[in-house]
Image (cartoon, rainbow, N blue to C red):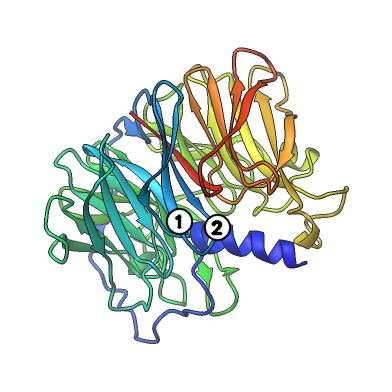
């Protein structure tokens, strides 16, 4: 039971929830924020780095943290910058933006190649003791848009501005919140002049109980006003998702206006047609022993859209994870899905390992996997020219154990 609490607290409280030690502020959150009725025009979506060649890895022992990089030549260079125990890297103009989440609440912008800090930008919100930033996406002008899991707002910041002056605006998402006043905003993707933000709708004071369907909220970046898809329903309305706890987004190789999302399965979220459907449904995950929505960890897809690779928690022995998930986080396992098959099946490959956050990334024909295995932590490389993928080498030392991996140009 102790292991389950540690794993779920580490992944959930960083990626998809706040922390009960720091409850939301009791100050009332206004819900009369401006909305525009309608839907955005379809546009191609940008998810992560285009044609990545390198990796940025945040590492931690859950007391301290650091940044490790992997160059195009595959050379791993540990400890190029200081991190924190809950840090997620994102591509940024000219470098990388490291989002330091709950309890740290700042963004560190690192220069490409030198990895020196160009500015550490503290984040705050009037309705939260800890705003708990979760993600950042940049527009063509270099402005960053930061989701705050612990606040009803998201922030707009200028990474070129001096620390203390970088936050230049906020966007009110209160109409999309549930009764606790926060919409629990997390992931985001930009499609032309529209920013899409995932909201989770959790009763945080009530123990993170789900209060409604998750959705993608559309925001017009020109006016910074969210869209309301249905003016006849109370509150703001967006694009509903099929599953629970959106953990990661990838581009859809088949449709530029769509993305793939990891929830209780893998969803194809068409942000142009405003429709979401299962690409790999929860029943395929359940057949592999992945029955609880917190078990999936991360995923990636090949450029042709024919294969998907997934990392997920599994129990040590078969058990009913829907009834009692406490035994279902014994170890992580890699899976491959052949999407050309008549029915998608999660085929396991590789050895069991330990992981916490976004633990795999594809770069070219290599699948990089970060393992926190106590006797062999580090990065492992799998050859994607074989099916299933075969282990090339590893562990390659990252200093502290890997936490989250992001591919960059």
Local SS, label 1:
strand
* Residue position marked by numbered label 2 in the rendering: 61
Residue 117 can be seen, yes or no = yes
Outermost residue to the top: 385
Q: Position of residue 365 (x, y in %)?
A: 52, 17
Give the quadrant of the C terminus.
Answer: top left
Quadrant in the picture for the N terminus: bottom right
Identify which residue, 260 or 334, lies in the foreground: 334
Q: Please state which of residues 258 and 308 is positioned toward the viewer in this rendering.
A: 308
Residue 229 visible (yes or no): no
Distance from disc 2 to disc 1, alpha carbons, whole Å, reads 7 Å
Instruction: Name the quadrant containing residue 123.
Output: bottom left
Q: With respect to residue 305, does 277 lie above or below?
A: below
Residue under the point 65% across and 54% down: 294
Query: Which residue is at 71% across, 53% downward?
Result: 292
**Residues at marks 2 and 1 touching, judged by CB atoms closer than 8 Å:** yes
Q: How packed is label 2: few (under 14 Cα within 10 Å), some, or many (20 or more)?
A: some
Dot 1 corresponds to which residue? 65
Please state the horizontal and vertical placement of residue 2, each as a whole percent of the image.
74, 67
């Amino acid at each position: 039971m102790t292991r389950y609490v540690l794993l779920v607290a580490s992944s959930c409280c960083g990626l998809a929830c706040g922390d009960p030690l720091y409850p939301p502020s009791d100050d009332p959150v206004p819900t009369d924020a401006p909305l525009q009725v309608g839907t955005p025009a379809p546009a191609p979506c940008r998810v992560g780095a285009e044609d990545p060649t390198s990796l940025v890895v945040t590492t931690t022992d859950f007391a301290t943290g650091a940044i490790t990089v992997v160059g195009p030549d595959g050379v791993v260079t540990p400890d190029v910058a200081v991190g924190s125990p809950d840090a997620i890297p994102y591509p940024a103009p000219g470098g990388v933006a490291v989002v330091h989440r709950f309890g740290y609440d700042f963004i560190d912008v690192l220069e490409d190649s030198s990895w020196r800090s160009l500015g550490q930008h503290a984040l705050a919100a009037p309705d939260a003791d800890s705003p708990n930033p979760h993600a950042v996406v940049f527009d063509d002008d270099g402005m960053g848009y930061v989701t705050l899991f612990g606040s009803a707002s998201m922030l707009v910041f200028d990474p070129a501005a001096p620390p203390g002056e970088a936050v230049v605006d906020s966007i009110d998402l209160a109409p999309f919140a549930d009764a606790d006043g926060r919409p629990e905003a997390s992931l985001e993707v930009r499609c032309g002049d529209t920013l899409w933000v995932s909201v989770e709708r959790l009763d945080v004071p009530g123990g993170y109980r789900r209060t409604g369907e998750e959705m993608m909220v559309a925001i017009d970046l020109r006016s910074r006003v969210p869209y309301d898809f249905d003016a006849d329903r109370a509150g703001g309305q967006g694009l509903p998702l099929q599953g629970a706890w959106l953990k990661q987004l990838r581009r859809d190789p088949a449709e530029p206006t769509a993305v793939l999302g990891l929830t209780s399965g893998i969803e194809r979220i068409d942000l142009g047609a405003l429709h979401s459907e299962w690409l790999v449904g929860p029943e395929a995950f359940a057949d592999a022993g992945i029955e609880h929505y917190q078990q999936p960890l991360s995923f990636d897809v090949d450029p042709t859209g024919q294969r998907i690779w997934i990392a997920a928690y599994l129990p040590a022995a078969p058990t009913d994870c829907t009834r009692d998930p406490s035994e279902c986080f014994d170890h992580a396992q890699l899976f491959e899905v052949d999407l050309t098959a008549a029915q998608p099946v999660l085929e396991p490959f590789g050895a069991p390992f330990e992981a916490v956050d976004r633990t795999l990334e594809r770069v070219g024909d290599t699948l990089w996997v970060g393992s926190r295995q106590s006797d062999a932590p580090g990065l492992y490389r799998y050859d994607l020219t074989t099916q299933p993928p075969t282990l090339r080498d590893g562990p390659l030392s990252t200093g502290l154990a890997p936490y989250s991996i992001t591919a960059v140009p």
